Image: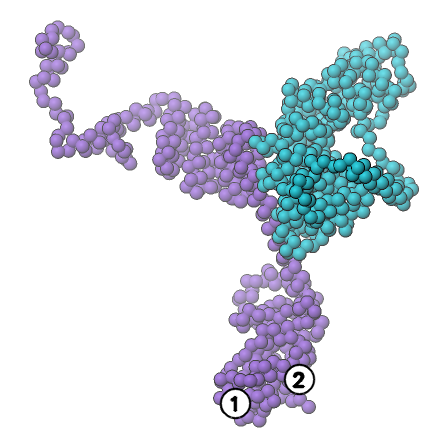
Chain colours: A cyan, B purple
């Protein structure tokens, strides 16, 4: 096994000659492994940023006959895509997108999941995301096809394609992507809604909830989203609803999907997703119409029970914010759209101050929580999805 | 003038023209029935006859045979049948339309699109006649021939809606929307199917919750009765009960531990519909029958609390006004004697008016029949009372 150090120019040339489809299998395999090793380190990635020829070679070798080699290539590409500084090189110099989108569409493609991860990484930051979306819509399969693939159970029986969720979530940072998802003349966002309850994959669920939250930033769509045409509210509340029995009166006041839930009903297990769901609903309370609908549909009953159950401080805080809006009085006229209210400067400073203090408090509580947990448990961070070699 | 035409042509035109001039035209309309005859000319018909009889409508029959000439290629024939069917369809003659489409399909031509259309149109005709199954089968067939045929997909979805199969309706809609994402009809139908599906799911959950609640309630009730040591009398097996045997079996499962009691023991055979119940404080309330054998009268208290005694009720019932049947005006509470009957032995046990109902029911010879305790009421010392009690084993109060 060769050492993972940077290559001299001669070494690089030699290696490059092995990284072709026609090269001898064992040399090809070793070279690919070596490159993979390089992508495992930050310095390695930076080095490859200046070597578009290697990037192109990796892409070409994804067509190789040897599954092991293709696997390593995709592995390497995933690592590279996790580094933001590589994005321009991957898109412009290596031109990975057309190949990736084409293969994604193939229902028999073994490495479709890897592609989803790469695309998800590439769309994380707005600048590259814009380019990804542009290529997707103008030159390749289009967002409609992505949604269709995402919503087709068993589209690819070798790859569950859950990472299309985060991809959608990332793409909806862009208003042009949101516009497509929220097209009233089509049925797009409606098809995503049931996935807020998709038990088999946190990634898929999280991606969908992230998408919905992004879509709620434009309050011009709120009334439509809350209307029967889409009916987003039950899908946001359902993961937060529990098995607690409510009175018949309370039940009858709830949206249909939340009535008479069975006693084995489980709540969303990921606290980040729970928080996102609440944040989405908070966004929907920005307008008076939205507040009225949430009130009418008895969202309060669900959040009340949720509040009794939730233990994670940041989620409790979000819940309390939402409940406050739900049970609070209607703001005076002129304040009806909370997103548009002009906050006087001194108040704004005060609020920022309070927010910071709250943040500090939450950090402290979080630390205490972590400390009290078992010492053996490792602190899990969530970096962009890269696979270490 | 025409008569001056040179008659040197070979085509016989000249002779024909001569004949024309000399002979009277036989086929002319007559004055008295020219309107009828007019209607028979295919070009001037206002409506086509139901059946085309070559004898009465020779021209029409002739035209028809040209149209349905079997020498033409099958595609053409099928197409003609399709058009015919469509015409009938427009006139809302759905049965005839179906026949035409069927004939078209029988030609088994190679044009899949045409066959898909024939199936789809026949599906529509069936739909309008209410033959949902047939309509659906045609939609499926059309879809098989041409998977992107939107009208077939829409029809299939509509049929599923009629079957209340909302999940499948959704699938048909979504297939259609994949081809035509902005189709208003499909979008609306999909929204409708989705809504109904979710409502149906709610209804199922609600029914399940209610069923569970009912079972829990019944379990608690039977438990309360058993705790108190009250014995329910098993009714005789009748044919009515054997048909309920499945439900009995289930209930018997829960009641099996409850010393042989079952829910039939609680079924009130009185036409009152009242049954024993457990209130929120944990007190039982029984429907109780008051029997006055002397006058062959009965009274009924639908919710007699187990902590109350008969005197409480009798004071009210025979308080200010005595009942009209009490002709001798002797049914004052202080004059009354109460007995319950041991159904097995026909023995009578006297009951103290001041004893709470619970204690009475707990008597080891007391069995509650049909979930309704019954009490016999006699007037102390009356002739009837003496006669009633004679010949029976009576256990009096000390």
> Split into 4 quadrants, where in the image is the C terminus of chain A?
top right
- In this picture, residue B245 sits left or right of residue B7: right
- In this picture, residue B194 sits left or right of residue B139: right
Residue positioned 54% across, 31% down in the render:
B176
Q: Circle 2 — which element? A: loop
**Mark 1 and mark 2 residues within 8 Å of each other at the beta carbon:** no
Give neighbour class at mark 2: few <14, some 14-19, many 20+ (Cα, 10 Å). Answer: few
Instruction: Tell how many labels.
Output: 2
The x, y position of residue A224, in whole percent, is: 60, 37
Residue positioned 66% across, 68% down in the render:
B279
Per the model, the C-alpha gap separating discs 1 and 2 is 22 Å
Between B294 and A313, the one nearer to me in the picture: A313
**Mark 1 and mark 2 on one chain:** yes
B18 shown above or below A362: above
B33 shown above or below B240: above
Protein chain holding label 2: B
Q: Which residue is mark 1?
A: B329
The x, y position of residue A316, in whole percent, is: 78, 45
> Split into 4 quadrants, where in the image is the N terminus of chain A?
top right
Protein chain holding label 1: B
The x, y position of residue B141, in whole percent, is: 49, 33
Give the mark, 1 or 2, whose residue is nearer the N terminus. Answer: 1
Quarter of image, res B339: bottom right
Between A56 and B312, the one nearer to me in the picture: B312
Residue positioned 89% across, 19% down in the render:
A4
- Regarding residue B148, the answer to whether it shows in the image is yes
Between A116 and A338, the one nearer to me in the picture: A338
Between B144 and A85, the one nearer to me in the picture: A85
Q: Circle 1 — which element? A: loop
- Regarding residue A37, the answer to whether it shows in the image is no
Q: Which label number is shown at residue B354? A: 2
């Amino acid at each position: 096994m060769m050492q993972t150090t940077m290559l001299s120019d001669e070494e690089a040339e030699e290696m490059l000659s092995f990284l072709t489809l026609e090269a001898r299998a064992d040399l090809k395999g070793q070279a690919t492994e070596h490159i993979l090793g390089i992508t495992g380190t930050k310095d390695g990635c930076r080095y490859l940023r200046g070597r578009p020829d290697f990037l192109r070679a990796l892409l070409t070798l994804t067509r190789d006959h040897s599954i092991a080699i293709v696997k390593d290539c995709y592995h390497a590409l995933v690592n590279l895509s996790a580094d933001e500084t590589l994005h321009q090189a991957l898109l412009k110099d290596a031109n990975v997108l057309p190949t990736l989108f084409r293969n994604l569409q193939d229902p028999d493609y073994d490495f479709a999941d890897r592609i989803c991860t790469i695309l998800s990484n590439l769309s994380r930051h707005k600048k590259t995301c814009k380019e990804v979306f542009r290529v997707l819509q103008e030159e390749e399969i289009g967002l409609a096809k992505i949604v269709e693939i995402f919503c087709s159970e068993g589209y690819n029986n070798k790859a569950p394609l859950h990472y299309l969720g985060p991809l959608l979530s990332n793409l909806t940072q862009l208003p042009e992507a949101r516009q497509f998802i929220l097209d009233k003349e089509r049925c797009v966002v409606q098809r995503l809604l049931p996935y807020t309850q998709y038990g088999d994959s946190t990634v898929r669920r999280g991606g969908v909830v992230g998408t919905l939250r992004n879509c709620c930033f434009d309050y011009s769509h709120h009334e439509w989203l809350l209307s029967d045409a889409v009916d987003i509210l039950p899908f946001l509340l359902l993961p937060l609803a529990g098995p607690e029995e409510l009175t018949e009166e309370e039940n009858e006041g709830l949206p249909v999907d939340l009535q008479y839930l069975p006693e084995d009903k489980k709540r969303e297990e990921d606290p980040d997703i729970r928080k996102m769901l609440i944040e989405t609903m908070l966004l929907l309370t920005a307008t008076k119409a939205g507040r009225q609908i949430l009130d009418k549909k008895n969202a309060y009953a669900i959040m009340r029970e949720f509040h009794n159950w939730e233990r994670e401080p940041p989620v409790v805080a979000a819940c309390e914010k939402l409940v406050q809006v739900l049970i609070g009085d209607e703001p005076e006229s002129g304040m009806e759209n909370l997103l548009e209210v002009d906050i006087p400067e001194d108040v704004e400073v005060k609020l920022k101050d309070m927010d910071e203090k709250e943040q500090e408090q939450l950090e402290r509580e979080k630390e205490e929580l972590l400390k009290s947990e078992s010492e053996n448990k490792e602190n899990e961070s969530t970096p962009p999805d890269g696979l270490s070699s | 003038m025409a008569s001056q035409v040179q008659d040197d042509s070979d085509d016989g035109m000249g002779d024909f023209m001569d004949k024309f001039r000399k002979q009277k035209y036989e086929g002319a309309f007559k004055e008295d029935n020219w309107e009828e005859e007019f209607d028979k000319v295919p070009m001037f018909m206002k409506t086509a006859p139901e059946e085309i009889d070559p004898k009465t409508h020779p021209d029409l029959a002739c035209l028809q045979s040209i149209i349905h000439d079997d020498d033409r290629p099958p595609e053409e024939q099928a197409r003609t049948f399709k058009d015919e069917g469509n015409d009938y369809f427009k006139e809302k003659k759905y049965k005839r339309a179906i026949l035409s489409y069927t004939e078209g399909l029988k030609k088994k031509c190679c044009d899949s699109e045409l066959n898909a259309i024939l199936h789809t149109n026949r599906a529509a005709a069936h739909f309008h006649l209410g033959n949902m199954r047939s309509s659906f089968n045609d939609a499926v067939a059309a879809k098989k021939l041409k998977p992107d045929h939107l009208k077939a997909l829409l029809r299939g979805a509509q049929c599923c809606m009629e079957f209340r199969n909302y999940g499948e309706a959704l699938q048909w809609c979504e297939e259609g929307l994949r081809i035509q994402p902005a189709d208003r009809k499909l979008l609306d139908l999909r929204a409708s199917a989705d809504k109904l599906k979710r409502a149906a799911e709610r209804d199922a959950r609600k029914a399940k919750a209610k069923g569970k609640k009912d079972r829990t309630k019944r379990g608690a009730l039977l438990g309360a009765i058993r705790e108190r040591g009250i014995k329910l009398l098993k009714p005789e097996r009748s044919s009515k009960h054997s048909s309920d045997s499945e439900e009995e079996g289930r209930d018997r499962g829960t009641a099996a531990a409850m010393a042989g009691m079952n829910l039939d023991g609680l079924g009130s055979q009185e036409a009152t519909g009242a049954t024993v119940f457990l209130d929120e404080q944990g007190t039982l309330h029984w429907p109780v029958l008051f029997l006055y054998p002397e006058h062959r009268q009965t009274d009924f208290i639908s919710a007699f609390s187990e902590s109350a005694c008969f005197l409480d009720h009798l004071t009210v019932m025979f308080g200010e006004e005595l009942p009209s049947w009490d002709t001798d005006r002797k049914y004052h509470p202080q004059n009354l004697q109460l007995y319950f009957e041991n159904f097995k032995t026909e023995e009578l046990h006297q009951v103290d008016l001041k004893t709470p109902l619970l204690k009475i029911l707990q008597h080891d010879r007391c069995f509650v029949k049909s979930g309704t305790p019954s009490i016999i009421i006699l007037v102390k010392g009356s002739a009837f009372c003496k006669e009633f009690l004679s010949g029976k084993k009576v256990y009096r109060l000390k």
